[in-house]
Amino acid sequence: MLRRHMVGPLVAFFIIVTAVLPFSAGAEPKGKLIMFHAGSLSVPFEAMEKALEAKYPNLDLLREPSGSQKAARKIAELNKPCDIMASADYNVIDKLLIPDFADWNVRFATNQLVLCYTDKSRYSNDINADNWYQVLQRKGVSWGHSDPNLDPCGYRSLMALQLAEKYYKQPGLYDKLIANRLKENIRPKSVELISLLQTGNMDYAWEYLSVAVQHGLKYIALPDQINLGDYQHDDLYAQAVVKVTGKEPGTFMDMKGKSCTYGVTLIKNAPNREAAIAFLSYMLDPKGGLKVLKEMGQPPFIPCRVPTEEMKARLPGELKGLVEVRN
Amino acid sequence: MEKREPFFWLTISSSVVILAFIVLPLLDMVTTPSVSMLRETLKDRDVMRSIWLSIYASGAAALISFVFGTPLAYLLARTHFRGKRLIESVIDLPIVIPHPVVGIAILSVAGKNHWIGQILGDLGIRIMGSATGIITVLTFVGLPFYINTVKNGFEAISPRLENVSRSLGASLSSTFFRITFPLAWRSIIIGLIMCTARAISEFGAVVIVAYHPMIAPVLIYERFEAYGLKYSQPVAVWLVLVCLFLFLVLRVLTLRKAKES
């Protein structure tokens, strides 16, 4: 009986809603919003996606995580439609997308290398930011990093060790450290090392800060001169060079150190520019996306940065207030 | 010419489909790399080492299955007891569990956060990243194939033969080694082949327990990730060829044995 009473009002309600929707929708972002982003941003962007889609129910954010270079190539070489591109290395946007596919590049967050461990790791009570490189040389300590040939976190870990040799003024430190690291402790991807830590098969592992925070691991934070986290030290980082495999077996190429600084841009011929700007105004807001990034261990720039006044002038009006000029 | 029933053509055509399904992709893979590329790969130390490790570790897994699995297979074939179905299901578990889960399970027992891992550590045995670990994983996934095959073999032998032997005064062990074992020899060989074959193909569980040292499937994956298809295919071809050769030899040998007996 109750049901019959409710049908009438319900039908009326839906008729009104569907009649009114087309008028109200014009005011808010809707439709598909395509975003290519670095794999390491998946967790915070998933949280932002949920927040934004709750705010704009007619908006559907389609995220495609991949390597940052690959994401840029999809836009520049394959001409895939895309609205927003977020890179784990802000240089990728400068090099591959500006000026043909994008006008500006906002640096919005950083990441850095940390040494992860658990309270069951050997010498976990002794280790600190001053003696970590001595602990890693102790006999019986099992530590590892990901494969430098397959995972950027892998060669960055080796770069951090080279930078440590310089920072602590200990010639030969890098070789001594590597001598105490079993080849068997190298894994394809850094995330795989976490299960080895948690099961007690490994004592220490090199990870990004974001990974450490998102998995609730203990970690040693290293000085900025070592951790590849501050782009103002880029000249110093460039002194760290790691040899990785080239295009075919037996060939090699050199990777130079640089900071883990995230950049984001709006693609020039974005299919859904209006929604993209709505997302970016949320993402670059200290109370919105930047807060999420902070919680996920990817320290944001508050406010976000562009290098020149000229670039700031090219930003959409809605975003100008969220960005400062700072190199 | 005698007229064939439609059913005959049905069996023929489905057989052709099945064979094409298996052979075509493999044939394509085997014929894609150039001969010079194959020759070059053969000179690559890493490739040879990984294929050898694959064969060695799988063989070791089969041997362990033989030593520990044969008595269990015999027990399951000859006795009936409460909970036998449960034990049989437990033995089948490694077949159904997703491969990475097998790796994770073994690692979590082998770590020093577990008492088994602590004992192993005290004995100086390392599971993670070692040939020991690889063999452990391969035995885990290969055992069910060995036990099930050999169990069927024992079941096919009439218990009466054993009873006769026992009634003539032979002990249980001498009956097993002189009557049952020789008769079950062929199914034991087939069990070993099945177990080795299953072990050689394992990837998902091994890559979690040991990335280095690399078995052939892990090396193929690494080559694919780092250099692309072009450089992973020749390794795959050699692995396929070596396996095909080994299993062909074993089959021929066992068939001959079967004819003799």
Image (tube, coloured by chain):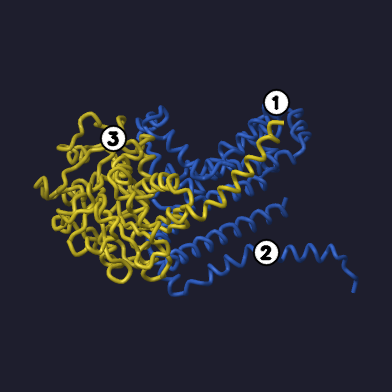
Q: Position of residue A47 (x, y in %)?
A: 39, 44
Q: Nearer the viewer, mark 2 or mark 1?
A: 2
Q: Nearer the viewer, mark 1 or mark 3?
A: 3
Which of the labelled discs sits on residue A218, or is there none? 3
Amino acid found under the numbered disc labelled 2: Leu
The local crowd at label 2, few if under 14, some if 14 to 19, many if 20 or more residues have their Cα within 10 Å, is few
Q: Let me know if marks 2 and 1 both belong to one chain.
A: yes
Instruction: Give the quarter of the image for residue B12.
Output: bottom right
Q: Name the residue tied to disc 2.
A: B19
Q: Position of residue B125 (x, y in %)?
A: 38, 36
Can residue A252 be seen from the camera position used here? yes
Q: Position of residue A319 (x, y in %)?
A: 28, 55
Amino acid found under the numbered disc labelled 3: Lys
Q: Let me know if marks 3 and 2 both belong to one chain.
A: no
Image vertical order of residue B89 relative to residue A237, above or below: above
Q: Name the residue tied to disc 1.
A: B81
Question: Is label 2 in a helix, a strand or a loop?
Answer: helix
Q: Chain of mark 3?
A: A
Residue drawn at point x = 16 percent, y = 51 percent: A163
What is the distance, in whole Å, between disc 2 and disc 1 at their CAs?
42 Å
